[in-house]
Each structure stands twice: as structure tokens, then as C-alpha cells.
Image (tube, rainbow, N blue to C red):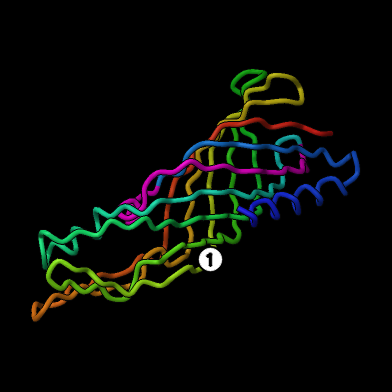
Amino acid sequence: MKKVILAIAIIFAATVNINAQSKISLGVNVGFSLPVTELANVYGMTPSAEFNAGYRITPDVELLLTAGYSNFKFRNESLNDDIHQLDYNANMNEEWTATVIPITAGVRYKFDQITKHVIPYGTAEVGAYITNFNKLLGGSINLTGSNITYNSSSKESQAGFGLALGIGTMFEITPRISVDVIVKYNFVKTDFVKDYTITKDTLTAVNVAGISTGMFLTTRAGINIKLF
């Protein structure tokens, strides 16, 4: 969370140092992040938020800086399905989390207005996705009788390359204030789960491949304000 606050402070400092003719806008959106494909097997939907700053270079095109926050909770179902291949009665119930903080730059392009006060747009962004894990699943899991021991790394942080593609709509309340609704697809190159092996006595070990890329959707709504 401290990194999100720092990123917001940097973006705000950059915007206020541009002169008043720069046509700056600021936005804050809140909503949910929903993992998709492989990531949905191990992490669940979570509340999320985003701060963005725009710099209009034409009436339809803005340069965009964003900082977001999502705190995914680990789902044990997929892990226990793997464990049940060796022991149906064994279960793990861990509270692992992955906090994803995207800091990106890109463009926002406004499409033809639906009405005078309803303006659809698209975004394309690239940047760093900082991911913090309180624990990162990986290594070995050993089943012995009713006991489960595992070798999982402790707190870990990664910074991976990512991109986001979004489509949204501005609903103008006043010439300077709009309600902003947006859905984004996010792709990030990060080890969300490392390779791990499950063993029990003399049974054949179960080897599980990790997840080195993550995809998730964000759906958010908030306020966008034109400062100048």
C-alpha cells in the first residue's frame, strides 16, 4: 500500500508542475479485480482501486499515467485437488495473498460521442506490475500420516512487465466532472505460483507446474475531474 501512495504522490507532483495550459485531468476509480484463465484457479476476485492522471494533447487523445491496487486471496481448491491425488483426506487451508500494484503509462482515445454528455473511450497502457506475496507457493509438499509439511518461500516481491487494454465511458455531470466507468484486461509476467512437488511415502510424486503469467480483469467506476 505504501508503494501505491508513493506512486500517487509522484504522479500528482508531476501534474502540478505542468503549467495551466496543459489540460490535466485526474481520476479515482474503485471496483473489483477478477482473475481469468489459470490465475482464476488459484486466486479469487478482490476489491481494487486506481488513480490516473491524463494530459490532453488533442481533444480526443490523452497521455495517461496510472497506479492501481489489487490484493488477491489464494484459493485452496486447486491445491487440494492436487493433494487428493495422493491422499483424499488431506487438505491445506492457507491464507496466502498476492498484492498487485501496476504503475503504467499509455494513451486514452475518445471515440465518437454517443450523446453530448456520454463519451466512450479506449485505453492502452504498459509498465511495471509490482507484486508482493506474503508467501509464494512453491517447492515441496510432503504428506505423512495426518501431517502436511511444505517448503514455501516466505515474503517475496517481484516486478514484472505488464500491459492493460481498457474500454470505458465518461458520463459528464458538468464540463469538468464526469463519472468514469471502465473495464480493463491486464496481462503481467510474474511468478504467481512456482513449480511444486507433492510426495507421500513411496507413492509416485505429483509434479505441478507453476504459473509464470497472470491475466485478470478489472471493472471499476469513479470520478474524473478536468483541472484545466
Residue 66 in percent (x, y) is at 65, 48
Number of numbered tags placed on the structure image: 1
Q: Of 167 and 222, which appears nearest the observer?
A: 222
Q: Of 111 and 97, which appears nearest the observer?
A: 97
Q: Which amino acid type corresponds to the residue marked 1 in the rendered image?
A: Gly
Q: Of 115 and 144, which appears nearest the observer?
A: 144
Q: The C terminus lies in which quarter of the figure?
A: top right
Residue under the image location 14 percent in, 66 percent down: 146
Pointer 1 local density, CA inside 10 Å: few below 14, some 14–19, many at least 20 = some
Instruction: Please say whether residue 13 is one of the residues in the magenta stretch.
Output: no
Q: Of 193 and 117, which appears nearest the observer?
A: 193
Query: Residue lying farthest bottom?
Result: 202
Q: Is residue 159 above or below residue 54?
A: below
Is 52 left, or right, of 161 in this rendering?
right
Residue 96 in percent (x, y) is at 39, 58
- Magenta segment boundaries in residue numbering: 35-58
Residue under the image location 81 percent in, 47 percent down: 15
As helix, strand or loop, the secondary structure at mark 1 comes to strand
Residue 43 in percent (x, y) is at 36, 52
Q: Is residue 172 above or below residue 77?
A: above
Q: Is residue 124 above or below residue 29?
A: below
Q: Which residue is mark 1?
A: 160
Residue under the image location 42 percent in, 67 percent down: 191
Instruction: Please say whether residue 53 is one of the residues in the magenta stretch.
Output: yes
Is 74 left, or right, of 53 in this rendering?
left
Residue under the image location 12 percent in, 70 percent down: 145
